[in-house]
Amino acid sequence: MSTTTVAHHEEHHDHPTGIMRWLTTTNHKDIGTMYLTFSLVMFLVGGSMILGIRAELFKPGLQLMNPEFFNQLIGVHALIMIFAALMPAATGFANWMIPLQIGAPDMALPRLNNWGFWLLPPSAILLTLPFTLALFGIGDGALATGWTFYPPLSVQGGIGVDFAIFAVHLLGISSVMGSINIIVTLFNMRAPGMTLMKMPMFAWGWLITAFLLVATIPVLAGAVTMLLTDRHFGTHFFDAAGGGDPIMFQHLFWFFGHPEVYILLLPVWGFIPQILETFSRKPMYGYKAQVYSLWAIGALSVVVWAHHFFTAGMPVPALLYFMYSTMAISLPLAVLFFCWIRTMWNGSMSFETPMLFAVGWIILFGIGGLTGLVLADVAADAQYHNSYFVVAHFHYTLFAGGIMGIMAGVYYWLPKMTGYMYNEKLGKLHFWLTAISFNLTFIPQFFLGLAGMPRRIPDYALQFAEFNMISSIAAFVLGFSQLLFVYNIVMCARGGKKATGQVWEGARGLEWTLPSPPPYHSFTEQPIIK
Amino acid sequence: MVTQGMKNVGLGLLLSLAAIHANADYSWNFPEPVTPMALDTLHVHNKFMIITGIIFFVVLAIMIYSIIAHRKDKGFQPVADKTPSTAVEIFWTLIPFAILLLIDFVIMGIPAYHSVVMMEDTRDKATMVVKITGSQWRWQYEYLDGDAQGIKFVSNLTTTDDEMHNKAEKKEHYLLDVDNHLVLPVGEKVRVLMTATDVLHNWWVPQFGSSRVAVPGFIRETWVQVEKPGTYRGQCKELCGKGHGYMPIVVDALPMDEYKVWVAAKKEELAKAAAGSDKEWTKDDLVANGKTVYEKNCAVCHQVTGAGLPPAFPALTGSKIATSPIFGADGKYLPDSHLDRVLNGKGVMPAWKTTLNDVEIASVITYERNALGNSVGDMVQPSQVKAARQ
């Protein structure tokens, strides 16, 4: 028995090197690294698209692009940021950290893991290829409907819509496979003694995210497939002339789309408390309350979808139901905010870059949450809907709440992953530049929305000029600050001050018991949790 | 350092909160409300902003205190929470839960309920009905009852291409001006029926506080009751294609007596135009009139020169449809002929029969066949368009 185990062990160490290592790997850390790298690259791609938009909106008039191209950029920017930057970043962390945090040697389904990752590059190509094809006179460019694919506009659109539909299919398959892997890993591979209620918060966040993905991605896949058959095979799901209804698409889309917001945020709500307890040097407050709140938010997220289109016309009882159920999400979120701050309270805090990002994240995500509460009001939503107020709101939740959260995680775990410390000064500079320019980009957009500027317009009336100019300048600072982030990561991966296994003085959890970087097979012997 | 950044964040919000109180200056908040609904919306918005602002700053203050006081570099030792006592934990976490419960469902929830009921009550006390139809990329207005019954017109953007491309000075109402304004009487509750001919649109005048999606194939309702005479401007706010930013809304609210004068004048104007479809037109007149119609309605896709934007928007110069015969031997128009395409549309090409009158359709077809590099030489009479509609 023991000899076979040893032989098995040796065989696994015999993995290919160079490019073949990355193509064929089934190792959770290698795949995690690929997810995170892919995410970073796509973050820059999606970011440069929006800088094009902000340059166009710098002043009234058409300067750089025609309205068709403008419409393509906004939709593809959103799809890339959501599906190719934020989601893969969370999956990358899951791959890297879940086995380490629960004391497992690897993910439960390593080959599925490899396949899940390798579906991503083709879908990124599908999303961006129509831009290139248009240069050669094939088709008329990428999806120009915004990321929401609303018919009949998307039925009218060119081949860019078909490319985007297939890209979403591939991304969806990848997400569902990643989720199944995480669910199976969490249910089967926890170290002895680690009951569900002793799991790290990050694992909890991801478990709920994984269930939401498995439940809602098929609905999105169905909706875009119906769109595809409407476009090419003469069906009338979304065409009133054939007995269909364009608004039905919105119901199907947002049945996925609203949980998607929590899919992006739940993993972050998982590791932020871990960062807070590390740098507050005391255990997180209200573990149970947080777990129950995460579940409550997960459950509520699938029953509130119609608040994304209150103005599309709905019966009064439906309006009231979706308004009150949406407001109810603030109850468990208030508990989470309370626990996060209560974790900091009476701690012995120090403010390294991950902690700066985590604290800044609480404040900025708080603004996103509170404006979301206001948006739930049906009457006021008639004004906010599809205005720049909404644009500002969801960038507070998805850029501050999502991406800045991910950045906290990157700085927190980077020394563990690479074995080297990143440059703390550059990290702090990156935080301050990001936080300040982010606010200067999006606070003006709240006012633009209130003043009546609709979103997704390539040109605007003269009274909106000043705020747009401030927002554009700040957006460029925000964009270029991210190069510091990339530089810091690259330099950290190449070397520097050696990191200890513990890395942070107050860090808790199994991942910190291993050396930095951890061995190729994380835990060959399962730790026992008391 | 941390507190400094928070002050930055805080300052921004403080400014916004201060702005809410400065109701006289609407540039930091919703524009001045002129309907009961917009007024209600503004009140709801202000109330919510103050409540959420208070929550935000109280929580922020607690955080900032903790950040200043509970620091390692000040030598603060962590005070460990006592071994988790579930009862204490539940008690503390239920406090924020209860506060939010009160705010959500009582302080905010009750007024929100009344707003929704008011917003959706489109019929009580409504004295007239206006139908609004969104098309790519213009609005069409139709008065369905009362004195104004039968008035129907299309409202097009008047901002010029040169203004958009920075070749001419931008006028005061850049992108917010149209040729035909919707005219409504002051003080009357107007029931608005909303639909679309092609894709989704959304009719939004910020000062009215109402916005509703126009869905092709369905009728949606809302209402407006303008309390103050004036000119109000808005825009489409549902992405509807490349012209989404170019279909503004302009509404003139007039006192009842002036409104009645406008109705009479508009009816006379429309009657004159209708008479035009029975008269025999010369080719030159049709071409001259067609140029205006073309540049207003068609040039956005097919371009002023007729070169189009292939492949999405084909060229008209030398196009098969614009140069092949329109009428068959029996005098009826042929399928897929120029007239068929303009009347009924196909794919991205909208059907113009509901938005243009007989004279306009006859003119624009004659123009396209005898200008833009084409010289077919034939023409279409308004009477033929009228016949083709039957």
Image (cartoon, coloured by chain):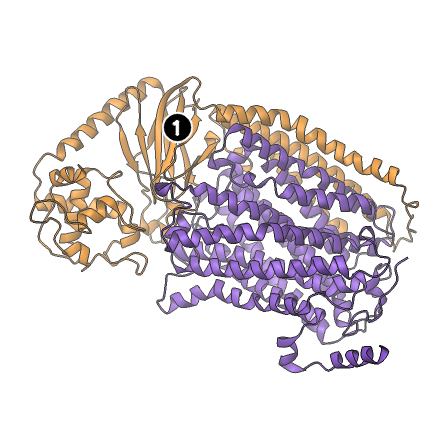
- Between residue B234 and residue A524, name the one nearer to us: A524
Instruction: Indicate the quadrant containing the C terminus of chain A: top left, top right, bottom left or bottom right.
Output: bottom right
Q: Position of residue A433 (x, y in %)?
A: 66, 57
Q: Is residue A272 above or below residue B131?
A: below
Q: Residue at x 74, y 68 (%)?
A: A106
In percent of the image, x 87 and y 56: which residue is there? B73
Q: Which chain is purple?
A: A
* Badge 1: residue crowd in 10 Å (few <14, some 14–19, many ≥20): many
Image quadrant in which you'd find residue A425: bottom right
Which residue type carries mark 1?
Val
Q: Chain B rendered in what hue?
A: orange
Question: In this orientation, does residue A250 appear?
Answer: yes
Q: Chain of mark 1?
A: B
Q: In the image, B358: left or right of B105? A: left
Q: How many marks?
A: 1
Query: Residue at the location (43% across, 68% down)?
Result: A132
Looking at the rendering, which quadrant does residue B223 occupy?
Answer: top left
Asked whether residue B1 appears in the rendered view, the answer is no
Residue B190 drawn at (x, y percent): 39, 23
Q: Nearer the viewer, residue A519 or B317?
A: A519
Tell me: B86 left or right of B60: right
In the image, residue A383 sits, relative to residue A5, either above or below, namely above
Percent x, y for residue B243? 37, 48
Read off the residue under disc 1.
B192
Q: Secondary structure at mark 1?
A: strand
